[in-house]
Amino acid sequence: MAQQRTQLWAAEADIDEDIDLNLAIGTYAQNDYEEASLQQPIADATLQAMQAHLSQQNAFAQIPDAVKAFIVHFHQAVLDNNLAEITIAYESGWNKFTEKFYAKTEWPEAELIAPLVNDDPIFLILYRELYYRHVYSRLQPNIDDRFHSFENSCELFNYLLNSDGPVQLELPEQWLWDIIDEFIYQYQVFCSWRSKVKSKTEDELVMLAEGGPQVWSSYSVLNVLYSLMQKSKINEYIAAQREGKSAEEIAEIVGEYGQRPLYRQLGYFSIVGLLRVHVLLGDFTLALKVMDNIELNQKSPFTRVTACHVTTYYYVGFCYIMLRRYPDAIRTFVTILNFIMRMKQYHTRSYQYDQISKTADRMYALFAMCHALSPSRLDDNIANIAKERFGEQYAKMSKGGEDALASFEELFLYACPKFINANSPPYDDPAAIQSLLAPPTPAEASAVDGSSQLDATHRHLQLFLSDVAAQSQIPTLRSFLKLYTSLGAPKLANFLDADEEEMVQEMMVVKQASRSFSRVPGSSSPGLLDGETITTSDLNFVIAENMVHITESTVGRRYAGWFIKNTERTQKILDDLKTMPLPATRAPGQPQQQPQQQQQQGQRESKKVGWAKTA
């Protein structure tokens, strides 16, 4: 298999030159032999080999028999391409044995369980993918874990992209999404860890100097995702399906790779992965551009994997916020939050329930920010939940002024993605690293905030707050305008404690904020960047002859949503009543219970009701 693999970076069709894989994974695992090491006695080498063999045997013996049987069964399911058994082993078995045996420790290393799977290289790559994902989620990865996880990802994608023809491998959709999702997550975590120069040890500085610029580089991650898209021809597949072409025509268009579900699903998930990566790098326009062929509706393929569904809407909504398209962001968050509420009972069964709940809570915070900047009545239910969770911050943001900026900053830092720096610090330049490690002078410390000097998140925060600060006086001005149908400009300026010129400038800010570039529902253009300018405010005004004339258009209440919400609430009450036991009746000759007995019986009945509700 090793002869069939070519370098990962040679997968891109547009790149002609061959790139050595050592440039990608570094030389951290390679040591130069010295002549002295060759002169060691053979007996010492034999003794060390025996000790290593005995140690490996002891470690193998410590693996529980149930785990060994699970690995053998898992391997056989992968060999047989049995999707049903693979899904059960992946979603149930792996998590079950993790909680039972490896909740606070690592799974056995791949080399240790290799005899159980006949040293199958493909299964060992997949096993290492699960192994390192467990290390990242439950434990604290060290620098070797970070480097080796990248090496394993290179081997996996080299196998998929550079084999002779499509590989004969079938994996469930959930696992394929998790592979892409974890690949980007480990890249994000590594970039954040790499940017913190002062926390590195001497050994880590040496390893980063030798292989750091290539390991988890932005170029390699983007190249993998774009290569999967091009290999599967997923954009051509989506366009052909939209045009209503036959299965034979689609097969001819997408080729042998695009016909395989494995490549088609990986290509589709890579589009969502590129959306996420471009957001992390701060290119929000390009992030939405790569989603041109994907429609945001309940019929899209990404909705079959709940984690992918939630991730897509979260990053699309955040892009709209950073592009100041608040109505589009509100519509995006309302759609996915309503879906999460409707499907909550099913989400509790998913091993990713906690992650979905955290993402939903962050979207409620983003919705509260958008609602304060561009008030709308798109969904009162979601708005009420956001106000309950972030009531204090929402009240300050709605009032505007200087106090609002602190609340916007708090919610933004809580709900935004963890942005990354695309470029590595100059670890290969000792002089530059020493200057970064040196404590700042008093003049430098007072001139630059050291905590946010290289922090990409704070750079995006400052850009967002600069736009919010420009609109900070809008709530106050709107509150005065709603009181009048016509008002003299000098009088309004007096209310605002400003001269007429400043008042006119603030009025223009209000006018600008009341307009937004937004997608139009029902439009024939599916692109997420397409749209037209709309009015988002119910307040309009004109200034003529030193007078301000105000008109206000009221939007009727949406009664459909109110009736649906209360119907669901009534249905829930009815279901609870059906699960409650009937009151016990007293026989004709039975004496009346004493108050203490009645109280004890009431407690027993309440426990029964609580158990019935839980069931």
Image (cartoon, rainbow, N blue to C red):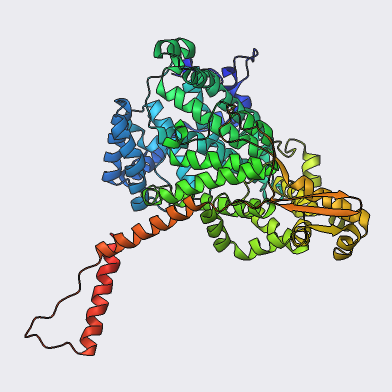
Q: Residue at x 32, y 45 (%)?
A: 63
* Position of 159 relative to 84 (above/below): above
Pick the front one: 412 or 436: 412
Locate residue 38 relative to residue 217 in the image: left or right: left
Pick the front one: 523 or 350: 523
User: Total label count?
Assistant: 0
Residue 339 place in picture, x, y as percent? 46, 46
Res 318 seen here? no
Pick the front one: 331 or 191: 331
Q: Residue at x 48, y 51 (%)?
A: 561
* Position of 213 relative to 498 (above/below): above
Q: Quadrant of residue 529?
A: top right
Residue found farthest to the left: 589
Q: Quadrant of residue 115?
A: top left
Locate residue 327 relative to residue 355 in the image: left or right: right
Q: Residue at x 31, y 61 (%)?
A: 574
* Position of 446 relative to 241 (above/below): below
